[in-house]
Image (cartoon, grey):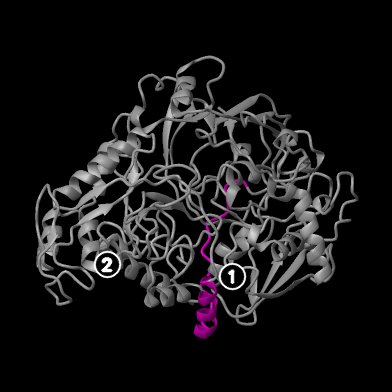
Amino acid sequence: MLQRAGLGGRRRTDLITALAAISLAVVATGCTAAPIVTEPPASVTTTTTHSAPTGTVTWAEAPSSAPDWIFPFASLTHYFASNINQFQYLMYRPLYFFGPIDSTSPMVDEALSLAELPKFSAGNETVTIDLKGWKFSNGQTVDAQSVIFWMNMLEAERTNWAGYAPGELPDNVTRYAALRPSSLEVTFHFRSSYSQTWLLYNELSQITPMPEAWDITRLGGKPGSGGCARSPLTSSVLQACRAVWAFDTDHNGRSKPAKMAGDLATYGSNPLWKVGDGPWTLSRFDSVTGEATFVPNTDYSGPKRSSFAKFVELPFASETAELAALSRSGSGAPDVGYLPVEAVPTNSGPLGSVGPNAPELASRYDLFPAYGWALAYAPANFNSVGDGGYAGAILRQAYIRHAIQRLVDQPAIIRTVYRGYGVETLGPVPIYPRTPYLSVSETDNPYPYSPSVAIELLAGHGWTIHRGGTDVCARPGTGPDECGKSIARGAQLFFTWDLVCAGSETGCEASKLEKATLAAAGVTVTAGPFSDTEGSNSACKPGPTCGWAIGDPTVWTFTPQVFPSGEYLFSTGVTWNYGSWNDSETDLLISRTLVSSSLSALYQYEGYLAKQLPVIWQPAPAASLTEVRKGLLGVTPISSLSNLTPEYWHAQ
């Protein structure tokens, strides 16, 4: 998913039907499965006797990112970590939990998952899931019916599930069933053979089993009376699911008067939202500020219950307000907060190290940088007719993208703007935290910062270089030393690039530095009149309204689709492919990552995209510079997927 805020704060929008081509390629390839990569089980794996929880622990919500959706079936409007990983997961656990509590790894955590690792048969076309028998807080077992309820909802309302991709779940499933509703075993039958890793990390990872108490169409209705959790799936069950979805979500929050997920004012009082299988129960929610208070779920079946009697998520209107609260030693200071980049002393150590804390906080807090399982990039619009009509044609030239990438000084931006807390993006797989998914070909960095190489590339392809000005095409044509197809004599390297400040001091600093390094080689960029909802970072067809050339830097976090196979970002025609990258080799390589018997297919895709540059890679700032009150243990290591697990926090 795209981050709610960060380098650009663009929202994730839904996919279009081109992903169906990926499914067809999967069938044609017919490969077998890659082995599932897992982390060792968490250090605490069995339920133990606990003393009564006491005290309150508090956590600072990101600025203007208070949760606003409680139902674990979210449309694009609500598809953010602030709603899912940091709110819903506390109460309603996904079928498979990713991001072990004792590691920054994005791998699956068996101990915190509701089911055992899936079993594969029939050439990986059949997947059997054995649930552990955990309980919802009302006593219902998390069983096959709980999984089927969510899957039936997906079948009925797939376009209202933000993770839906045509050709993938549920389109690639022929049938899912259980011997009986109360069974702890559910079986999925897929249309073809897929990689075991891809099935677990990108398909089954999306499922959140739901209690029968939500299968209703009116308040006070008998659990299950809605009929959405029935099996087998029929047209009448689909119709029932649409009615249940409309009730549970208030028609995606639009119905008046609101009753359920659209009514934030009743989140803390509605008894239906207290039926969960997670370690926490929401006891109070302020619909105006977004402050959320949780208490331990005394019926939690998982391996660890909280030592604290309350966990409170504190809202802040700005980073300045949160920093002021941290700086106070009295009431209102969060136990776990964040430090704005501008307030942290520069860290000169290697990636992952910790430098000095802000002096005003050092006596009471410890600093821990947290890095996301994420990419940062600026989309290049290959359909652009802006900047004299040549922008798209210019960007379609590989040497142009190579030259521009050579002019992005990622190490300098990390060092000076992000104060040493950032990660370079070198290709389509994050380089940190380190995982088996990272290939040597990507870490070799095919395009390190080098203005001299960039200038040589441009001059060698017919451009007259004007350092500090704007380069001009002097040799039009398609020869190896000419500007390229559809680029006329006199065309300029002048791009409308949404390098804007967006109200952020660090954003302004990064923009100024990047524009300066580009200008040194005669590449001129200017901010365009774009907004968060139209223009930049929105796919468009060639025409008068397709004027943006390079979009604003954006951060993509791989969750809940954790395996970095690329079908959501770089496949032909998907909407997250903002720049309309259209390349048959990319599509073929992506399709192989979905079915391959080893990681070699991912490495081939990774190496190819790292060199082809479908986007302009950007440095990713640390996901957060987390401040933890001294004496509070268990907060670290911090999840690269933005998960919150305060049940593991405890006082020294």
Indicate whether 598 appears above or below 537: below
- Front residue of 137/248: it is 248
Q: Is residue 251 magenta?
A: no
Quadrant showing the C terminus: top right
* Mark 1 surroundings within 10 Å by alpha-carbon count, few (fewer than 14), some (14 through 19), many (20 or more): some
Q: Position of residue 242 (x, y in %)?
A: 77, 59
For label 2, the residue is 393
Residue visible at 27% across and 67% down? 393
Q: Position of residue 55 (x, y in %)?
A: 66, 24
Report the Cα–Cα distance between label 1 and label 2: 33 Å
Could you tell which of marks 1 and 2 lies nearer the N-terminus?
A: 1
Instruction: Kindly indicate the quadrant of the structure image that contains residue 15.
Output: bottom right
* Mark 2 surroundings within 10 Å by alpha-carbon count, few (fewer than 14), some (14 through 19), many (20 or more): some
Kindly report which numbered mark, 1 or 2, lies closer to the viewer in this rendering. Answer: 2
Indicate whether 141 appears above or below 237: above
Q: What range is drawn magenta here?
A: 18-44
Horizontal side of residue 492 vs 360, given as left or right:
left
Amino acid type of the residue that numbered disc 2 sits on in the rendered structure: Ala
Q: Where is residue 345 in the image (x, y as percent from the top left)?
A: 31, 29
Q: Position of residue 140 (x, y in %)?
A: 83, 51
Residue visible at 37% across and 65% down? 542
Horizontal side of residue 197 vs 231, given as left or right:
left
Q: Does the magenta stretch include residue 31?
A: yes
Extreme residue toward the top, this view: 330
**Residue 229 appears in the picture as rendered:** no
Residue visible at 69% across and 49% down? 252
For label 1, the residue is 168
